[in-house]
Amino acid sequence: MQTSIVVNFVYPLPAPPEATDQGVVGGGRRELKSVPFISYLSALQKSQLLTDDMVNGVEIRCEEKGSCPASCHLCHHQAMMGGVSGRGHSGNSRSGEQPPPIPVLLEVSRVVPLYSLVQDNVTKEAFKSATMSSYWCAGKGDVIDNWCRCDLSAFSKDGLPNCSPLRQPILRLAPYLEPSSTMVALEWMDVEPLIGCKVSDYVIQHKRVEDPSEAEVYTGEVLSLMDDLFSGLGSSCVVAGRRTGDHPHSVLYSVVFKCLEPDSLYKFTLYAVDSRGSHSESSFVSVRTSCPMVDDSRAEEIADKVYNLYNGYTSGKEQQMAYNTLMEISPPLLYRVQYHYNAHYEKFGDFVWRSEDELGPRKANLILHRAEKISHYCRSLLRSTHIQSRTDTMAYVYCRSEEGRPPSNMWHGSLHESRTMCMEKLISVQRNTYSNTKLR
């Protein structure tokens, strides 16, 4: 494990006599005189308490801000300007001598584990063990190979070791696939550390939420990444993938939901499960799918057809044909038919009045009631002057497990150990474009 550490030294520290000036003050307390850190290092070297090997990861850079003890080989002296004159008997610098610089910056010149600076093998191993335990096992266990052996005091209330707890996976929308009227793509980074707990599965739950403030009674559909998605036993409406992340040893998981309801609010929840059965904290994303797809050309054709059926004397056969046509189309398309009818033929009576007059109040009410299910937001879009359809082709990763998996209560491995076959697939996504001006 490579560790880069910045250390602030605060004097007094254990030092040789020449680095301190001790005196007895009132109450028998000793007052320690502070000295520059470079003088402290020099004094340690003179007293043979500091060897060159103990500072092999430290470099001192200097600037022209005073004098530097000549005995300190760690201080990099700049070239003297104008030559150097000899010293007098007093040892003070003469006018022609450039004073050596004093160090003002302490840096790590190369990254090494902190415990490698310790020379004693027993101390080094103890330091290494403590550092690894603190970093990977929260200081409550020992690192054994690539897992944590927890101390007896590091167990949760349910009796499971928790010195290497599961981190919370952060669920987010996949940036490569914008949500459509029926599709949402989600992704998250793998939370299994290199050393410590082993993630055996991820569980994702999705449900349609009519009111965000409603009670959490309906749990929705719960899917296991391994048992349902990678195994292929789940619905073809939900596919999962796995690929390498942007950094080494990072894994990115993705799930694409392909059969959602348009203009609906969905809540997606994710949590991780480790090899001991513990669950991580959940994260969730709420997404509203876009408005339903509408074929504007067909809506205009149906509006013309209904006008022709309503025009003049309407027989019972023509009335039934108009009624069947308007009841068979989807509510968004019906709303768009009403828009086109009023745009072209309102001078002969608007759509509502003509339907009540030709079909009767009961049948007209059944037809118009279907359009009331559309949200106010989608209604405003369906009143746009122009609606065009387009099809986007997007790529996603699809993975299937290459091996059978025992029942989840008997399986104690890591997702990294599972063999999966992944491939990139293309999916067509239909979208509407709304505008009050003519689109190209």
Image: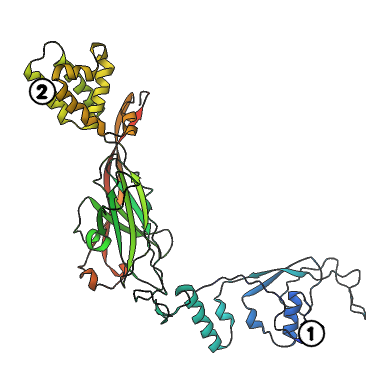
Hey, what amino acid is under mark 2?
Met
Q: Is residue 17 left or right of residue 268?
A: right
- Residue, disc 2: 321
- Residue 202 or 154: which is nearer the viewer? 154
Is the residue 246 above or below the residue 263 in the image?
below
Residue 362: quadrant of the picture: top left
x, y percent for residue 370: 21, 31
x, y percent for residue 423: 27, 56
Hey, what amino acid is under mark 1?
Gly
> Measuring 70% from the left and 84% from the top, which residue is drawn there?
14
Q: Residues within 10 Å of mark 1 (few under 14, many from 20)?
A: few
Is the residue 256 above or below the residue 123 in the image?
above
Is the residue 405 above or below the residue 362 in the image?
below
> Measuring 75% from the left and 80% from the top, which residue is drawn there?
42
Asked whether the beta carbons under mark 2 and mark 1 sit within 8 Å of each other, the answer is no
- Residue, disc 1: 27
Q: Determine the residue located farthest toward the right in the rendered image.
A: 89
